[in-house]
Image (cartoon, rainbow, N blue to C red):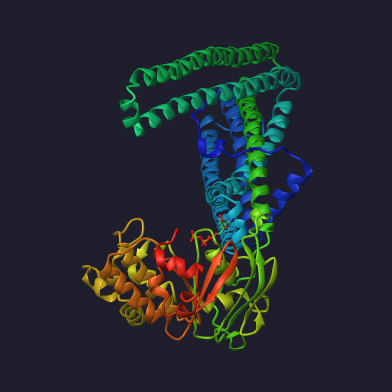
């Protein structure tokens, strides 16, 4: 029957059940290993609870027969005694069911939490290129929807399958034992009804999903028109939109009415066939009873067990469809777990003496194109030499490749050819985490994490004390405005917190970098202009930050880089001019000189 739509699950694609996909899924069961004992105990409780469940119709049979005075050994007791035994049986069943649910939830939650942590560790250590090629939404659904599906498989699916098998086997054996011929009669009708119900049910589900999609489409019209209401009104197109909506809605109505015919047919068919089957079996059983071959209790137990078996058969279809979804989920998760990660550590490490940098940076004939756009070379033969403590300014028009240089220095990407050297050593010979620990990036768009100002600054060195954080904030000219907030350093920022101005955010980012105390500083100057007071505070903070470290500054305003040791004028992936401000300004018709004259950059 058509059920309410559970979009979170239906959106998960199914895959074909093949030997390969099953093998993949079984590998996920590796995560079960640490909880093997509990898992096996859970399986035992499933078997026990299925067993006691089948004991119920058996005792029911004895109870009814005892009323007729025809109980057969070994339960030739009074009805009251049998009823008490049944209550005891139900009590035991309660314990078994409780244990089954508790143990499987314990195992399921723990395994999926291990799996989630592994996926997260993978995600966070993937190279930058990976993030350029995958959508964040899709990646996060690996950790939420896919992991959920796997959890259900670990706990629910296997348990349901085992329970189903046990009930089918025990149930079939039991009704065969009650009466062979009646079982054959039952087998000739019940599975047919189940199969028809499944096929029909699937078709109806598909139809109702279509109707829901149609409804969603009509909602898009509503959203579109309401969010662009000014357009609708300005064009006086209310009549047009009303017509569009009417057309959409009438499609929904048509489809739903068409569906109702099938649903009506399905429900009436099911009522007819289920009760018809019961009538048929009971009629046949009544004949056997008349002939003295069957007791009243036998007949009752037979009908109850048949209902169990029929229900289990139908349940297998759901297990099958869940299995397909799980195979899809595990395939995607396994793909992710197989991806090549960056060589970074996920434990907190300190800079080792052998990798401690002095801050000399050399680029030799570096060429680079982004892996996702191999055909366009962004950096074309770039060489530069920065000595420890120097300030290198990179200027040039938008799209020239300035930020790309910063990404290469951080080793987000590898050059296609040429070398990057730190203190004369090839960058590739320094472990990534060791290298990046000695660098700090102050980007153009400053990202503040949801948390307090203290936490945001301490991101530069997560174990810093409040005093160290405050000192960094002072140097970054941020202490004063932070102290003015009623909650000071405990003020929450980010999505749910207060909104800081552009200049304030920059100073937080500068404090974060000061706290990290990097050897090499990478600074992407914000393009948005600040008011002159704020600008002066930021510039002063930047001077504090750049003191005694090699700094690469992507500058958008030339006024801020006059004192730089070297200015590289980049155009189309090449260094067109380089030198100090005075050297460059004196080049007749030079690029820098012209840019300076304009005092205006495209970027
Ligand atoms: N992740 C990426 N994948 C593919 N191409 C990219 C990627 N990032 C940047 N590009 C391209 O590389 C070129 C250089 O970009 P880059 O950001 O280095 O320029 P920029 O000089 O910093 O520009 P701006 O001053 O506007 O920030 C651009 O054409 C851009 O489209």
Q: Residue at x 45, y 86 (%)?
A: 548
> Residue 476: where, in percent of width, then height?
34, 77
Q: Residue at x 36, y 79 (%)?
A: 472
**Relative to residue 121, is residue 306 depicted above or below?**
above
> Residue 213: where, in percent of width, then height?
51, 27
Q: Residue at x 72, y 35 (%)?
A: 169
What quarter of the picture does the N terminus occupy? Answer: top right
Q: Is residue 76 visible?
A: no
* Residue positioned most to the front: 588
**Relative to residue 568, is residue 88 depicted above or below?**
above
> Residue 153: where, in percent of width, then height?
62, 45
Taking the image as shown, residue 456 lies to the left or right of residue 483, namely right
Along the line of sight, the residue nearer the viewer: 358 or 174: 358
Question: Dividing the image into four equal quarters, which quarter contains ligand 1?
Answer: bottom right
Q: Is residue 592 visible?
A: yes
> Residue 60: where, in percent of width, then height?
58, 29
């Amino acid at each position: 029957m058509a059920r309410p739509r559970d979009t979170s699950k239906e959106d998960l694609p199914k895959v074909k059940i093949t030997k390969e996909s099953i093998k993949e899924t079984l590998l996920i069961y590796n995560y079960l290993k640490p909880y093997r004992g509990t898992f096996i105990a859970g399986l035992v409780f499933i078997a026990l609870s299925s067993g006691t469940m089948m004991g119920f119709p058996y005792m029911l049979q004895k109870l009814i027969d005892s009323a007729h005075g025809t109980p057969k050994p070994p339960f030739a007791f009074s009805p009251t005694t049998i009823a008490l035994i049944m209550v005891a049986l139900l009590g035991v069943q309660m314990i078994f069911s409780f244990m089954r649910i508790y143990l499987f939830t314990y195992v399921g939650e723990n395994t999926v939490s291990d799996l989630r942590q592994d996926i997260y560790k993978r995600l966070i250590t993937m190279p930058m290129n990976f993030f350029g090629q995958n959508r964040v939404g899709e990646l996060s659904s690996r950790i939420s929807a896919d992991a959920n599906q796997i959890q259900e498989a670990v706990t629910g699916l296997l348990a349901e399958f085992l329970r189903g098998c046990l009930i089918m086997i025990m149930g079939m054996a039991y009704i065969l034992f009650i009466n062979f011929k009646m079982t054959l009669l039952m087998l000739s009708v019940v599975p047919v009804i189940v199969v028809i119900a499944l096929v029909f049910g699937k078709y109806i589900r598909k139809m109702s999903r279509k109707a829901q999609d149609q409804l969603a489409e009509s909602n898009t019209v509503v959203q579109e028109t309401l969010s662009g209401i000014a357009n609708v009104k300005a064009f006086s197109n209310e009549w047009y939109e009303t017509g569009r909506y009417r057309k959409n809605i009438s499609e929904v109505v048509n489809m739903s009415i068409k569906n109702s015919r099938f649903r009506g047919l399905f429900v009436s068919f099911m009522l007819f066939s289920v009760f018809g089957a019961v009538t048929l079996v009971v009629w046949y059983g009544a004949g056997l009873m008349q002939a003295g071959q069957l007791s009243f209790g036998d007949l009752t137990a037979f009908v109850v067990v048949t209902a169990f078996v029929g229900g289990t058969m139908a349940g297998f279809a759901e297990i099958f469809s869940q299995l397909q979804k799980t195979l899809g989920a595990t395939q995607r998760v396994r793909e992710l777990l197989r991806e090549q990660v960056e060589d970074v550590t996920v434990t907190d490490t300190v800079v080792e003496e052998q990798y401690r940098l002095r801050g000399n940076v050399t680029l030799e004939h570096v060429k680079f194109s982004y892996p996702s756009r191999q055909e366009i070379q962004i950096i074309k033969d770039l060489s530069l030499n920065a000595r420890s403590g120097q300030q290198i300014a990179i200027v040039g028009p938008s799209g020239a490749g300035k930020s790309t240089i910063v990404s290469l220095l951080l080793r987000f990407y590898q050059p296609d050819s040429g070398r990057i050297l730190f203190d004369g050593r090839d960058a590739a010979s320094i472990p990534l985490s060791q290298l990046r620990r000695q660098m700090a990036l102050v980007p153009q768009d400053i990202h503040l994490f949801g948390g307090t100002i203290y936490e945001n600054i301490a991101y530069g060195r997560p174990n810093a004390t409040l005093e160290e954080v405050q000192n960094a904030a002072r140097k970054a000219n941020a202490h004063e405005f932070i102290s003015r907030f009623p909650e000071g350093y405990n003020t929450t920022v980010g999505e749910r917190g207060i909104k800081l101005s552009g200049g304030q955010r920059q100073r937080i980012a500068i404090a974060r970098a000061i706290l990290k105390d990097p050897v090499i500083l990478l600074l992407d100057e914000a393009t948005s202009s600040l008011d002159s007071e704020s600008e002066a505070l930021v510039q002063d903070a930047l001077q504090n930050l750049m003191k005694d470290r090699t700094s690469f500054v992507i500058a958008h305003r030339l006024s801020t880089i006059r004192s730089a040791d070297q200015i590289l004028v980049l155009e189309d992936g090449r260094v067109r001019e380089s030198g100090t401000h005075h050297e460059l300004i004196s080049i007749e018709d030079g690029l820098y000189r012209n840019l300076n004259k304009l005092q205006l950059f495209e970027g």
